Image (tube, coloured by chain):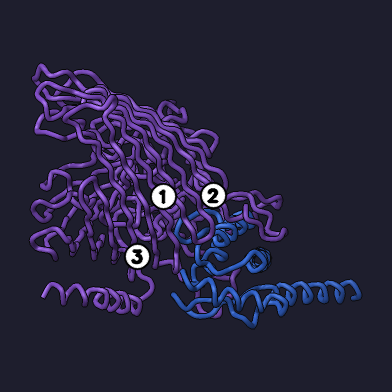
């Protein structure tokens, strides 16, 4: 009975932790974005930054689909941590991207977090 | 009336730019490469047709999307495991009773779903075999089916035939309003051109490109400096070549056809201005009488065979031979360029440590190229001696954040250029240079200013040949309300040997 209780408790803990880990999305098409409510509090400023700066040139849908599929939706290239860093560098160097190195670094860390959550 | 218009023109220009400034900010452009790869024009262009460094890499890789090769900055962390489910391909099982050599019995009605998945997997470069479905609202990331990335999905038939899925044809048009202070008709609206372009690749092995000038017109007795216009001012196939990529599994590409030989760092149209090509690329030598002159220009298209290669990602080399119509001897050329900083020639991003403070080197890119061309030209079927000539040049480009600085320098030597005197020829030394600074005020609003210089001097000084000098000051503003539509306003102040020219241009260029 004790073992059974422990097993049930373990299952509940794992299930709860998994469900909390997942990042939700909301909206469709060009309005698709990560659901701010499901993002860890410490990442919310970065998420807000992305939602303002990245959409100057492309939709957030592009980022969401890249995270969901593991592929950049336009090029079909792998979208993993290595690619996230490369995209970050590309955006840093892009004229008029209006993002400094710290902002890019924060966004790269945030996207790595989202990718990790998506793997859980 | 004209004076009134001249006074009004700055206001008209300002009004035009003001209207343009309130036009929509972005749109999806649709020429051939955009259609084929489903990317924006701005992937490869600043304001088309000027290329950014990714467009330059695309060009150098014979119109194959280079980021398919490899992306990116190094990262020590391993990539996440593929999220798509692997599809196990069941092996057909032959009946034990089947005779040797007989076809195996295929049993069952088949699995259409599995076949669809297998074909889907075969036609894409990804391991993903899940059906494309848009994620539902409020869905969790890991719960949704994986939408299929655009990539390059093709039907099996098209793939095996090596035929591009989208018809790789684009159209570009140019309409210019030109103000020329010396023309009888000072304001002329007749400069226009309409071109067809085809470009792409066959299974990433053979790249191809063609440009056909379907129609062009410019004012009579024009100063002839309008780059949107074909030089012959009529229909013409100006480019038509194929490039066999990675010849025999080597890093060398073989390019054959009518092309602009790889000499300078930039093709003719790779600039913001719609009218003025770079002087070191466009000048011709002599032309003092109706007889022989050296008609060669760096940027002219020629029937050529070229070998080129990207070595070590940052070094580009090209050598080629040119067949000039009406003469047996061939001409030859070579080009080398190297890129410091920035994305390399395969479009891989540079390694930048994001944990460190910002540095100038994070944003600095320097591209340096040198070239040489050796040839011989003259009047066909004539006893006149042929002109042996050569050109050498050095180009460089510096990119730093929103600033782009281009420097061009050229030197030429023609040993037999005609003079006014009959049967008299002289050697002419030409020197040319350009410096251009361009700044991106916004991603779709660029401003540039340029200074150019050319001198042609007979050496030794020969009676009957007038030395020539040109100095140009050019200011350009370019704006694209849509990525496939460009508005340009520019003004050129030109000092030639015995005259001053003032040319203003309001140009509209579009592609679809």
Residue at label 1?
Answer: B435
Chain for mark 3?
B
Residue B430 percent location from the top left of the image: 31, 34
Q: Name, please, the residue furthest toward the bottom.
A: A37
Q: CA distance from mark 1 to mark 3?
A: 16 Å
Residue at label 2?
Answer: B365
N-terminal of the pair, mark 1 or mark 3, is 1
Query: Which marked residue is nearer to the observer: mark 1 or mark 3?
Result: 1
Q: Name, please, the residue furthest toward the right.
A: A2
Q: Which SS class for mark 3?
A: strand
Q: CA distance from mark 2 to mark 1?
A: 17 Å
Q: Which SS class for mark 1?
A: strand
Can residue B90 be seen here? The reply is: no
The structure residue drawn at horizontal position 10% and vertical position 76%, both measured from the top left corner, is B1
Residue at label 3?
Answer: B477
Residue B99 percent location from the top left of the image: 43, 28
Kindly indicate the quadrant of the structure image that contains residue A117.
Answer: bottom right
- Left or right: where B124 falls relative to B332: right
- Chain letter, colour purple in render: B
Q: In the rendered view, would you say B258 is above or below B471?
A: above
- Chain letter, colour blue in render: A
Q: In the rendered view, would you say B421 is above or below B270?
A: above
Q: CA distance from mark 2 to mark 3?
A: 23 Å
Q: Alpha-carbon neighbours of circle 2 within 10 Å: few (<14), some, or many (≥20)?
A: many
N-terminal of the pair, mark 2 or mark 1, is 2
**Badge number at residue B105:** none
Do marks 2 and 1 both belong to one polypeptide chain?
yes
The structure residue drawn at horizontal position 31% and vertical position 49%, both measured from the top left corner, is B471
């Amino acid at each position: 009975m004790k073992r059974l209780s422990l097993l049930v408790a373990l299952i509940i803990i794992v299930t709860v932790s998994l469900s909390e880990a997942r990042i939700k999305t909301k909206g469709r098409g060009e309005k698709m974005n990560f659901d701010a409510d499901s993002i860890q509090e410490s990442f919310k400023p970065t998420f807000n930054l992305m939602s303002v700066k990245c959409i100057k040139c492309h939709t957030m849908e592009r980022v969401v689909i890249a995270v969901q599929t593991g592929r950049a939706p336009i090029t079909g290239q792998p979208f993993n941590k290595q690619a996230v860093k490369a995209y970050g560098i590309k955006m840093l160097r892009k004229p008029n991207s209006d993002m400094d190195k710290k902002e890019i670094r924060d966004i790269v860390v945030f996207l790595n977090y989202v990718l990790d959550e998506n793997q859980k | 009336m004209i004076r009134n218009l001249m006074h009004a023109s700055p206001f008209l220009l300002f009004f035009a730019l003001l209207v343009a400034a309130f036009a929509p900010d972005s749109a999806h452009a649709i020429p051939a490469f955009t259609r084929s790869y489903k990317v924006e024009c701005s992937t490869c262009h600043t304001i088309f047709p000027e290329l950014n460094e990714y467009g330059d890499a695309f060009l150098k890789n014979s119109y194959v999307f280079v980021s398919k090769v490899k992306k990116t900055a190094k990262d020590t962390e391993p990539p996440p495991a593929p999220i798509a489910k692997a599809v196990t391909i069941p092996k057909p099982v032959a009946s034990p009773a089947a005779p040797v050599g007989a076809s195996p019995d295929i049993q069952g009605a088949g699995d259409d779903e599995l076949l669809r998945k297998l074909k889907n997997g075969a036609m894409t470069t990804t391991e993903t075999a899940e059906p494309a479905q848009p994620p539902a609202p409020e869905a969790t990331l890991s719960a949704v089916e994986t939408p299929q990335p655009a990539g390059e999905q093709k039907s099996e038939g098209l793939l095996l035939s090596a035929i591009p899925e989208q018809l790789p044809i684009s159209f570009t048009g140019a309409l210019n309003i030109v103000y020329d202070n010396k023309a009888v008709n000072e304001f002329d609206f007749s400069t226009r051109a309409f071109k067809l372009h085809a470009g792409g690749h066959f299974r990433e092995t053979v790249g191809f490109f063609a440009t056909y000038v379907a129609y062009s017109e410019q004012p009579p007795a024009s100063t002839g400096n309008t780059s949107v216009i074909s030089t012959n001012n009529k229909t013409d196939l100006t480019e038509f070549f194929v490039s066999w990529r990675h010849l025999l599994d080597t890093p060398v590409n073989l390019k054959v056809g009518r092309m602009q030989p790889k000499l300078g760092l930039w093709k003719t149209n790779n600039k913001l201005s719609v009218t003025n090509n770079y002087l070191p690329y466009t000048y011709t030598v002599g032309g003092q009488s109706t007889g022989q002159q050296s008609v060669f220009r760096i940027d002219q298209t020629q029937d050529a065979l070229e070998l080129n290669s990207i070595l070590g990602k940052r070094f580009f080399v090209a050598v080629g031979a040119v067949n000039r119509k009406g003469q047996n001897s061939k001409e030859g050329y070579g080009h080398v360029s190297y890129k410091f900083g920035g994305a390399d020639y395969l479009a891989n991003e540079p390694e930048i440590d994001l944990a460190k403070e910002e540095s100038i080197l994070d944003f600095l890119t320097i591209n340096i190229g040198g070239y040489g061309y050796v040839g011989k030209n003259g009047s066909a079927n004539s006893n006149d001696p042929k002109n042996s000539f050569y050109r050498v040049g050095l180009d460089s480009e510096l990119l730093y954040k929103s600033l782009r600085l281009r420097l061009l320098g050229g030197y030429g030597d023609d040993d037999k250029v005609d003079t006014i005197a009959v049967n008299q020829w002289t050697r002419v030394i030409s020197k040319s240079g350009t410096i251009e600074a361009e700044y991106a005020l916004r991603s779709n609003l660029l401003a540039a200013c340029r200074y150019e210089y050319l001198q042609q001097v007979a050496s030794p000084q020969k009676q009957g040949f007038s030395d020539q000098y040109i100095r140009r000051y050019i200011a350009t503003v370019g704006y694209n309300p849509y990525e496939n539509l460009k508005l340009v306003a520019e003004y050129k102040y030109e000092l030639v040997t015995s005259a001053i020219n003032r040319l203003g241009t309001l140009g509209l260029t579009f592609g679809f």
